[in-house]
Amino acid sequence: VPGRCGDLGQSPVLCFCLSLQFRENIQDVLPALPNSDDYFLLRWLRARNFDLQKSEAMLRKHVEFRKQKDIDNITSWQPPELPSKTC
């Protein structure tokens, strides 16, 4: 299956160790993530070629963006009422 550790040019053992270290490094932001399973976290590692520092920085920027834009509440957003024209 594409996307698994063995298919990414990394040994499965190294990939597993990196994913554990990555999870440990981002413990403080895990509750803010929409999903924190191994597959979801592996996507961040793959995106930065298994560079832990770059993956962590990218994930932290993602979490900050979600907070700034209030992404978790986007489905409950209501547009403001338009002002009535009285001319």
Image (spheres, rainbow, N blue to C red):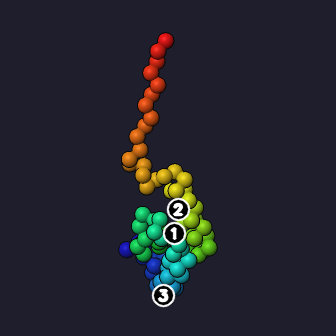
Residue with the mark numbered 2: 63
Label 3 SS: helix
Residue at the image position 58 percent from the left and 61 percent from the top: 61
Nearest to viewer (mark 3 / mark 1)? 1
Residue at the image position 51 percent from the left and 85 percent from the top: 17
Residue with the mark numbered 3: 13
Residue 26 drawn at (x, y percent): 53, 74
Q: Earlier in the sequence, mark 3 or mark 1?
A: 3
Residue extending farthest to the bottom is 13
Between the residue at mark 3 and the residue at mark 1, the CA separation in whole angstroms equals 25 Å
Q: Name the disc covering residue 65, or none.
A: none
Nearest to viewer (mark 3 / mark 2)? 2
Between the residue at mark 2 and the residue at mark 1, the CA separation in whole angstroms equals 7 Å
Between the residue at mark 3 and the residue at mark 2, the CA separation in whole angstroms equals 28 Å
Q: Is residue 82 above or below residue 30?
A: above
Q: Are marks 3 and 1 in contact (CB under 8 Å)?
A: no
Characterize the local packing of mark 1: few (<14), some (14-19) or many (20 or more) Cα atoms within 10 angstroms: some
Residue at the image position 46 percent from the left and 18 percent from the top: 85
Q: Amino acid at mark 3?
A: Val
Residue at the image position 54 percent from the left and 66 percent from the top: 59
Q: Is residue 51 above or below residue 82?
A: below
Residue 67 drawn at (x, y percent): 52, 56
Residue 79 drawn at (x, y percent): 43, 37
Question: Which quadrant of the figure has residue 72?
Answer: bottom left
Q: Earlier in the sequence, mark 3 or mark 2?
A: 3
Q: Which quarter of the rendered picture does the N terminus lie within? A: bottom left
Q: Amino acid at mark 2?
A: Val
Residue with the mark numbered 1: 29
Residue 44 drawn at (x, y percent): 51, 69
Q: Amino acid at mark 1?
A: Val
Q: Is residue 70 above or below residue 81?
A: below
